[in-house]
Image (cartoon, helix red, strand yellow):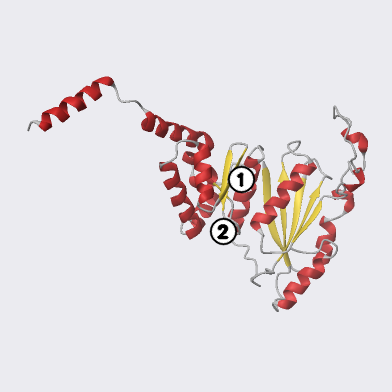
Amino acid sequence: MATTSIWSINNNLKQSINYIINPEKTLNKDYGNEESYSYLEEPIKDYNFKQEKVCYVSCLNCDENNPCDDMGFTKERFRKKDGVLAYHGYQSFKEGEVTPDIAHEIGVKFAEEMFKDYEVVVATHQNTNHIHNHFIINSVSFKSGKKYNNNLTNISKIRHISDSLCSEYGLSVLDEDKFYKKTYTKSISNDEYYKTLKEDLDNVISYSVTLKQLFERMKSLGYKIYSRNGVITIYRDGEDKVRIENVFGEEYSKDRLSERLYSSRQIVFRPMPQKSIFEEYTRAVRHAFL
């Protein structure tokens, strides 16, 4: 389970970045510590422990040595230096549910999905009982120059992606408020990408009899598809990742899909009873003499 929040930064962007990347909070405590791998039955051969990540900090679409300058350059390039400078996002996990490695991995994936057209700094803090991620997101897109809109639709999308990733990693999921869920569903209901994906998926389901067949046929239509912890995710390059059960409902869960495909297989391969064969034969003979 992960709770999320996001707020605007109106001054001193560099100070905000420095706060989230503070080594005292982000330091990998196992860095360079060979003893932390003592639980392994076989020792790791030829492994350079000094190549481990020193701190749980990652930068997306910007230079990790000076992300603030890259964000500033983007603002100057599109002449949007006024107003909100950036946004500060927060994702906190249930106590004891994740390791810093997994939390950071989820945080990076979350940023890649939610803010793919923006410069982002991701930092994982371990200084509280609840491991949590911080995100500093430039307010201006480095691709389009558009300003990020922190509206209800995007807040709902943040919650949706965070919960979806928790499901994918086998973590508990926050009971999503119906209001936010309804807002997210409404925001994608007329989106051509989602409508086309669902149509393609329903069509493929109608003539597939195994999950493997379904996966291969979706891939042949240009989609990428994978399953992790029972969560099926389908997407096209450059588009949103769609965890189909979360978006389209329980009928698209992995277990329910397996049941539906199994039923199709029974219909396709069910042998005709002997009585039916005889009835078909006599019907054919009777028609022949009419």
Dot 2 or dot 1: first in sequence order is 2
Give the residue pinned by disc 2.
153
Q: Is residue 286 left or right of residue 202?
A: left
- Which-is-in-front pick, marks 2 and 1? 1
Measured as percent of width and height from the top left, residue 98 is found at 75, 39
138 versus 43 height, above or below: below
Observer-nearest of 41 and 64: 41
Q: Give the amino acid type for the residue marked by disc 2 in the picture.
A: Thr
Side of 51 relative to 214 (left or right): right
Q: Tell me which residue sits at (47%, 47%) in the image.
A: 201
Query: What secondary structure is found at the residue carrying circle 1?
Result: helix
Left or right, 275 with reference to 55: left
**What label does residue 204 carry, if any?**
none
Q: Where does residue 25 sit, x and y in percent of width and height?
A: 86, 49
Q: Is residue 117 visible?
A: yes
Q: Are marks 2 and 1 in contact (CB under 8 Å)?
A: no
The answer to whether residue 12 shows anywhere in this view is no
Q: Name, please, the residue furthest toward the left.
A: 290
Q: Give the percent coordinates (x, y) of residue 149.
A: 62, 65
The CA distance from mark 2 to mark 1 is 16 Å
Q: Residue furthest bottom?
A: 79
Measured from the top left, where is residue 185 in percent x and y?
50, 52
The amino acid on which the numbered mark 1 sits, given as a three-letter code, is Ser
**Quadrant for the C terminus in the image:** top left
Residue under pointer 1: 164
Q: Which is nearer the eye, 147 or 221?
A: 221
| Mark 1 Cα shell of 10 Å, populated few (<14), some (14-19), many (≥20) | many
Q: Which residue is found at the position 82% from the left and 43% from the top?
A: 128
Give me the residue at 81% from left, 62% from top: 16
- Residue placed farthest to the top in the image? 274
